[in-house]
Image: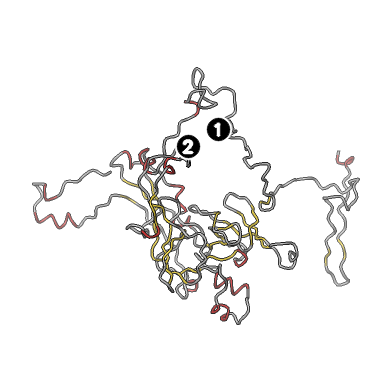
Amino acid sequence: MFQPRILARQCPRVTSKYLPIIRSFPRAYATVVEPVHAEVPAAEAATAGFAPPVSSSDSSSATFAMRTYKPRTPGVRHLKRPINDHLWKGRPFLPLTFAKKGHGKGGRNNSGRVTVRHRGGGHKRRIRTVDFHRMTPGVHTVERIEHDPGRSAHIALLNEEATGKKSYIVAAEGMRAGDKVQSYRAGIPRDLLESMGGFVDPGVLAAKTAWRGNCLPLHMIPIGTNVYNVGSAKGRGAVFCRSAGTYAVVISKDDETSNKDKGPRFVTVRLQSGEVRKVSMHACATVGIASNPHHQHRQLGKAGRSRWLNIRPTVRGLAMNAADHPHGGGRGKSKGNVDPVSPWGQPAKGGYKTRKVRKPNKGSIIMIYLVLRPYIPNLNVPESRNPLHKPPIQIPSVDGPKPLPPFPPINFKDSA
């Protein structure tokens, strides 16, 4: 990638007395702006070896910096990478990996047909076995943070203190080697229950368990907490918010008394896409934000680096023949007076809805529509059937509750 340099000892004009001075200069291949880290108060320091909980001051935008390179070659002129100097430089833990082989590298299914376009080639990879269930209780120590070529987020190698068993998990933003994390999916430990006096206090329980990197059931996580690796049902692994920098927000929980005899209770979360979804209260979630949040700002710099990542070129439909794409063919470069579509005729723009009509999933997805209507009190509709009617607000006073005066009627003749 970089041009070779001439050694100083090979230059005839450089004498031996200048060699120590030349060797003292560092070889700076890249230039980078060091991020400014905010000081953490002593009161928020980690206690008992656990990572501190996620706070609003730990924003990733405050330490945003990208590594740029000197344009020694055209391939590194536009190359930009996130600064991840804390990553492990060696090979992965081989017992938790296996080689990636077969048709999957080329986007083929089991019959050999292309199901995913623009895939093929790429460097040899080993698939890391990541634990998305985290059912094992006990304290786990983070040995190191590694790069996973199969995903955008980083992974952390955990070592269980009781048995020494190792496992991979998706690392949280800010997680470093030496941190201690724990999973509470199997239940509340006995020592934690005894420290609270033998009964569960929701506030104390959240202060002791809702820490960065800990895996908990959703009903144990406070409202407003950022979580990632969110599950969908009880006993299943994480399926939502697993890529770099993604997170969900816990919005609300079903009350125990209001939904006592109406089946299972749910927790409402807002996903990264803005979709509001109802998830089982026993589903898993990890406190924090998925690591490597600046992955979206990287620039590969050259086409060959895309081929290393198993990405093949994308051909425009306008440049194809008429038999290969709806936009192909014709004399010239015009696709005609048609809306842009995919190679299979599906509209590509304009807000086309892709959810299947026969699978609306109304029980899990909450659709929110905001309808703005003027308030007209003189409707010829009974108050019991009027959706805009609301009872008057009761204001407590010394003499007793008195209702507010009704909204004054609108005289459309005078306003006209």
* Residue pictured at 54% horizontal, 24% vertical: 335
Number of residues whose C-alpha sits closer than 10 Å to that of mark 2, classed few (under 14), some (14–19) or many (20 or more)? some
Give the farthest residue toward the front: 111
**Mark number for residue 114?**
2
Look at label 1 and name its amino acid.
Ser
Secondary structure found at label 1: loop
Q: Quadrant of the C terminus?
A: top right
x and y, in percent, of residue 175 in the image: 44, 63
Task: Classify 10 Å Cα crowding around label 1: few (below 14), some (14-19), many (20 and above).
Answer: few
- 1 or 2: tag closer to the N-terminus: 2
The residue positioned farthest toward the top in the image shown: 331
Q: Which residue is mark 1?
A: 342
Residue type at mark 2: give it.
Val
- The answer to whether the residue labelled 1 contacts the one labelled 2, judged by CB atoms less than 8 Å apart, is no
Image check: 217 left or right of 410? Answer: left
Q: Nearer the viewer, mark 1 or mark 2?
A: 2
